[in-house]
Every structure is written in C-alpha cells, then in structure tokens.
Image (spheres, coloured by chain):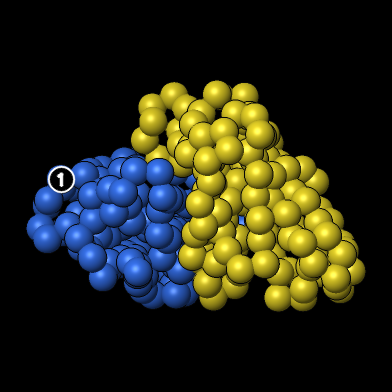
Chain colours: A yellow, B blue
Amino acid sequence: DAGITQSPRHKVTETGTPVTLRCHQTENHRYMYWYRQDPGHGLRLIHYSYGVKDTDKGEVSDGYSVSRSKTEDFLLTLESATSSQTSVYFCAIKNPSSGIGYTFGSGTRLTVV
Amino acid sequence: GQQVMQIPQYQHVQEGEDFTTYCNSSTTLSNIQWYKQRPGGHPVFLIQLVKSGEVKKQKRLTFQFGEAKKNSSLHITATQTTDVGTYFCAGDSGGGADGLTFGKGTHLIIQP
C-alpha cells in the first residue's frame, strides 16, 4: 500500500547475529506497529509506537527492541537472532486516509539459520 | 490479556458455495475489524464494526457484530476463486495506541 514500505523484503541471517528491520511511512502518522506472522499463530504484536521516542511492548516482545527517532521510521532490532525468530514481519500504521483500520507494509521474510 | 478465537482454521468449499468464519473475544470490544490476506501477500483491511448488533455488507460479504460486542462473523455468499485467502478478525479493546489482537485466521480454499 502507498505510504508504508518495509526493508529488506527478504533476509537470511545466522543465529546470534543482530538484525534490524526498517519500516518507513510517508503519512506522518503517530502510531506504528510491528507484528510477526507464523503458521498457526496468526499475527502477534511485538512492539508499537505512539510517537517519536515513545514505544511500548506487545504480546511477544522478548528478544526484540525498537526505536523511533523520527516520525517516519520505526526500526525493529533482533539483538541476537534465534531460529525461533524465523518469521514474516509486518509493519502497520493506522489507515492514513480514514483513520479506520490498519494499513500493512508488504512484509519482511526473515530466516535465521 | 485479551484473546481472540477464530474458527474454523481451514475451510474447503466448492466454488459457488457459501462460507462463514466466526470470531469470539474473551473481553468486550470497542470495535472489531476484518482483514483479508491473499497467499504471499499482506493483510488488507476490509471493514470495521463498532455498534452492538451491527450488520454491514460489502457485495457478497456480510459482517456481523454480536449484541454483547464479543463475537463477530463474516459470511461470503456464492464464493468465487477470487475469495481465496486467509480472513482475520482483529479486536480493538479501545485502549488507544496499543494495537489490535488478531484471531489466528481462517484459510479459505476454493475448489473449482
């Protein structure tokens, strides 16, 4: 969807290495979210942000940290990647046009080997 | 914490048959949202229900919100191959910024 991009789209990394995923929005939206999607689990909230430097933990935050130094960027960091963090990661913002519903990025498929 | 249950996990239908997925929250919701995710894609917002007992329609899709604002359903009439995908409900407890709680989704598989 227009206005929210994720990078990289795919990444393979080794166990124990740090990994940073980026979410960039051009909608100047206050709220941003990181979800992970795994078979059988649906979408689970990792961290969210309600403004620059304002972040909070979600349901599955262990092993993840986030930073938001600018309105447009929300970074998700895996300090030391583990195989259990192999997943598809989605960033989301509230729908910029209507404020109803979330608009998701295209996702990052992360494989930890 | 809030939990959102969704059934069935998988549904196989013949093209032209109807399809229904059900969603149940452990807590009363401020609103419930529905999303569709095509294979290999990202979730796309379909609709939001806010009022107790609300019913909304989008062409062949009918969405309902229960009287107690804890359950919801999505019904598709006369499925088409374009309906293939995973349908998620997501509950909003009304806490402001703290995100949605998603059900695990129902995978709709359509046999021509």
Which residue in the structure is indicated by mark 1? B51
Q: Using the rendered image of the protein, determine whether residue A16 is visible from the camera's viewpoint.
A: yes
Quadrant the N terminus of chain B occupies: bottom left
Give the residue at x 66% y 44%: A67
Q: Using the rendered image of the protein, determine whether residue B110 is visible from the camera's viewpoint.
A: no
Front residue of B17 and A83? A83
Taking A110 as reference, is A100 above or below it? above
- Answer left or right for A67 relative to B80: right
- Answer left or right for A95 relative to A60: left
Which chain contains the residue that carries disc 1?
A: B
Q: Amino acid at mark 1?
A: Lys
Front residue of B80 and A73? A73
Residue A39 percent across, percent down from the top left: 59, 72
The crowd level at tag 1 (other Cα within 10 Å; few <14, some 14-19, many 20+) is some
Give the residue at x 33% y 56%: B91
Taking A27 as reference, is A12 above or below it? below
Which quadrant would residue A85 be assigned to in this image? bottom right
Residue B51 percent across, percent down from the top left: 15, 45
Disc tally is 1
Front residue of B37 and A2? A2
Which quadrant would residue A110 be assigned to in this image? bottom right
Q: Residue furthest front?
A: A53
Taking B111 as reference, is A25 above or below it? above
Q: Secondary structure at mark 1?
A: loop
Residue B39 percent across, percent down from the top left: 62, 57
Residue A83 percent across, percent down from the top left: 77, 75
